[in-house]
Image (cartoon, rainbow, N blue to C red):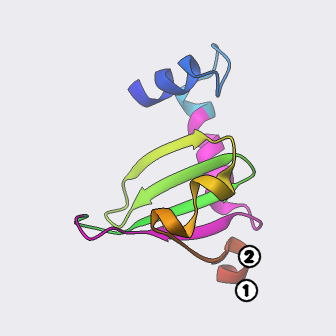
Amino acid sequence: MIHLKKRISRRDFPLETTLHDYNKQITAIVTHEKSKIYIYHLKHFTQRYFIFSLGTWIVIVGEDNVMETAMVTRSSERYLSNDKGYTYICTVKEVIS
């Protein structure tokens, strides 16, 4: 619930957004066939992270299956650049094909 409040305070969602609405948004991004999948890992991390990107939204999930965040970015391409440790893998459609 704390994370949803943060998203609302940043105006990623309207005030009346429920936790159910937020979870639906996350599920839609992670399952959309056009979502791009990245892996993120730096030397000091204890696990890898899987990132799902659709438009300006990104969802970050740890190898431990815990969702770290779901948020809006100004530019997902810039945010998920290789220079910052993100590696593009493929789209969801390519995974399920």
Along the line of sight, which residue is nearer the eye, 19 or 69?
A: 69
In this image, 23 relative to 61: left or right? Answer: right
- Residue 97 is marked as 1
Query: Which element carries disc 2, helix, strand or loop?
Result: helix
Instruction: Please state the horizontal and vertical placement of residue 65, each as a whole percent of the image.
Output: 37, 61
- Number of callouts in the render? 2
Q: Which residue sits at x=73%, y=86%?
A: 97
Question: Does the image show residue 78?
Answer: yes
Instruction: Judge by depth and name the residue closer to the eye, 17 or 3.
Output: 3
The residue sitting at the front extreme is 83
Q: Amino acid at mark 1?
A: Ser
> In the drawing, does residue 22 fall left or right of residue 50?
right
Specify the label residue 78 is tagged with: none
Percent coordinates x, y for residue 45 in the rendering: 25, 64
Q: Quadrant of residue 40?
A: bottom left
Question: Residue at the location (64% across, 28% down)?
Answer: 12
According to the picture, the residue beneath numbered tag 2 turns out to be: 93
**Distance in Å between CA atoms under marks 2 and 1:** 6 Å
Looking at the rendering, in which quadrant would you find the N terminus? top left
Relative to 60, is 81 above or below? below
**Residue 1 visible somewhere in the drawing:** no
| Residues in magenta, as a range | 22-44
Local crowd size for mark 2, using a 10 Å CA cut-off: few (<14), some (14–19), many (≥20)? few
Q: Is residue 37 magenta?
A: yes
- The residue located at (51%, 67%) in the rendering is 83
Secondary element type, mark 1 = loop
Mark 2–mark 1 contact, CB under 8 Å?
yes
